[in-house]
Amino acid sequence: MEAGRLRLVFLADEIHRDLLSIVEFLNRQMNPCEVIAIELKQYVGQGLKTLVPRVIGQSVDAQRRKSAKQIQEGRDWSREECLEWVNQRKGDNAVSRITRIASLAEEFDLEMDWGTNKTKPDLWIGIKSEGKIFWAFDIWASCGLAFRPILFGCCPVFQTSSGRGKLIETWNTIDGFTYNPDKAWQKAAQIDTLSEDSFNHLVNVLRWTLHAMKSGSVSHELTS
């Protein structure tokens, strides 16, 4: 305090993009105060309970004054940097599969953000609705693909019990996945380890979901 420096921390179990926008605004207005957001998730299983923190606000401030060297260190991820990072750790197959999902997102005119984490990327895929972006899908640095139940709220077709039930039924056809209503993030699959047939089916499930959102109907068949 005597030095005139202050750090403001937002702590929550889930950090939304709206909160990140607030962090960015405060960082612009409150120099030299540092504003960060920490996402603290709880994982429960096999009799254990673990809290895992994720600092995702530091790079918001860094975006305004980063150097080229800082970009290379991962403070603001481009598509190319993200895929190179994945290639070095997961190989060509993982890169190919992420690229295929990204191409599907582009086909349906979705928003993509390749991550702002300081040390590793992750691909956020968002749905544009009523002038807002709802970040509904995420491919983590570990190559896990997850979706959020925010889909139920931002897409009218999934707001009915029949539409929501059909979405859950369709996603439950993914190899190894079962919808858990108690989780904010639903990890659908580890895309780098799926068999080719299982990955192709995952892509078809994603396509079915995006087509339902665009058409406003869940009556179309899931292609095999």
Image: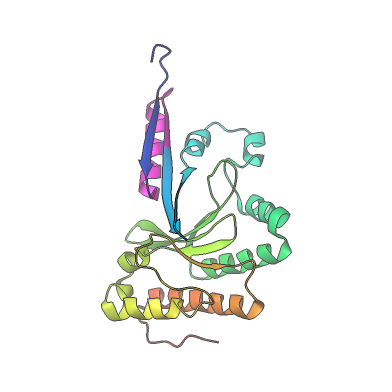
Picture quadrant where residue 87 is located: bottom right
Q: Which is nearer the eye, 166 or 172? A: 172
Please tell me how many numbered marks the rendered image carries.
0
Magenta run includes residue 22: yes
Q: Residue at x 64, y 66 (%)?
A: 192
**Residue 40 point in image, percent of width and height:** 42, 46
Q: Which is nearer the eye, 21 or 224? A: 224
Q: Is residue 27 above or below residue 220?
A: above
Determine the residue located farthest toward the left in the rendered image: 160
Q: Residue at x 66, y 55 (%)?
A: 86
Magenta run includes residue 38: no
Q: Quadrant of the C terminus?
A: bottom right
Seen in the image, is 97 located left or right of residue 63? right
Picture quadrant where residue 72 is located: top right
**Residue 110 point in image, percent of width and height:** 47, 64
Q: Which is nearer the eye, 7 or 126? A: 7
Q: Is residue 169 above or below residue 59?
A: below
Q: Residue at x 53, y 79 (%)?
A: 204
Seen in the image, is 78 located left or right of residue 15? right
**Residue 173 point in image, percent of width and height:** 48, 80
**Residue 31 point in image, percent of width and height:** 42, 24
Seen in the image, is 216 located left or right of residue 96? left
Q: Residue at x 53, y 45 (%)?
A: 116
Q: Quadrant of the N terminus?
A: top left
The residue stretch that appears in magenta: 14-36
